[in-house]
Amino acid sequence: MRLFPRVLTAALLALPLALVASPPAQAADPTTLTSGFYVDPNSSPALWVAAAPSDGRAPAVRDNVATKPMARWFGNWSGTIGTATGAYAGAADARDKLPVLVAYNIPNRDICGGHSGGGAGSVTTYNEWIAAFASGIGTRPAVVILEPDSLGDTSCMTAAQIAERNSLLNNAITQFNQKAPNTWVYLDAGNPGWRSATTMAANLNAAGLSRAHGFSLNVSNYYTTAQNITYANAVNAALSASSGYTRPFVVDTSRNGNGSNNGEWCNSAGRKIGTPSQKGGGAEMLLWIKTPGESDGNCGVGAGSVAGQFLPEVAYKMVYGY
């Protein structure tokens, strides 16, 4: 973060409470507090390239994947979560860069899909975890993608489970608003092939979108940027009609260079990396949220792997789209 925003942040903290509690749209813009997106030197493709420099695929993976800005995912594998998010946000801040973090630990995670099942074991555990997640970031600028799949993966859930999930997401947004004032939180809204725009707008509103900065689309999926923009506009139209507000959105472009293979979402063959992270592009930002080459689970071209495992052959082929 540049020096002058630190002074601005201190001044804002001294304002009356009524002003500090302004709507999310009035919060500090983390993209203006930094000089570009953070490139994680410890991403899974970067670590693979460092460990396999003589592999013939390494140059292509290095130049086209490992050196690009992408998100870091945090869950129950991340150790002490406040320490983990603090270290990541701090490393980015030291370089005056904007980190993108993914919170992925909600109870009953991927309950219907199953490949990434797990998450926090209880409501209390999750509430403590997400509060520490936000506290770790603190006043440093950041972008957080909040719980991918959580509002799309509900078809097998009971009404009570959905109500509990909405309560957890509402509280998560509260934690970031209170503890991470320079963070833009995007509540995940699935993808164009999952839920109707009207249904997703209702799900987003129930989960607290009115108090978040925006929503994210296409996380770990393959739909084109144009398809996502059309869907986002429909979601915003439904939000405006039903709830009286709209929100900006971001699109995961990490694997959408060839578009979707008829909606196949789990390690689909023949996919390609998309536009690297940038502001604009038809959305508020285009982001690499899913790491190209990381498996979706034991399926498709990732047969025999587990979700999150880096597969160099998949990453290599994704560079060229075959």
Image (spheres, rainbow, N blue to C red):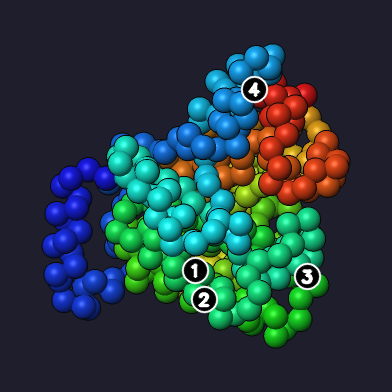
Name the residue located 14 percent from the left edge and 54 percent from the top edge. Answer: 7
Residue 215 tag number: none
Determine whether label 2 and label 1 are within 8 Å by CB: yes
Instruction: Name which of mark 1 and mark 4 comes first in the sequence.
Output: 4
- The percent position of residue 227, horizontal first and vertical second, equals 65, 44
Instruction: Name which of mark 3 and mark 1 comes first in the sequence.
Output: 1
Name the residue located 73 percent from the left edge and 49 percent from the top edge. Answer: 307
Residue 155 tag number: 3
Residue picked out by circle 2: 127
Q: Nearer the viewer, residue 272 or 304?
A: 304
Q: Inspect the image, locate mark 2, and give the three-letter code of the amino acid beneath it.
A: Asn
Q: Nearer the viewer, residue 86 or 217?
A: 86
The mark closer to the camera, 3 or 1, is 1
In which quadrant will I find the N terminus?
Answer: top left
Instruction: Kindly state the secondary structure of the residue where label 1 is placed.
Output: helix
Q: Inspect the image, locate mark 4, and give the three-letter code of the amino acid beneath it.
A: Ala
Q: How far apart are labels 4 and 2 at the CA level?
A: 40 Å
Residue picked out by circle 4: 52
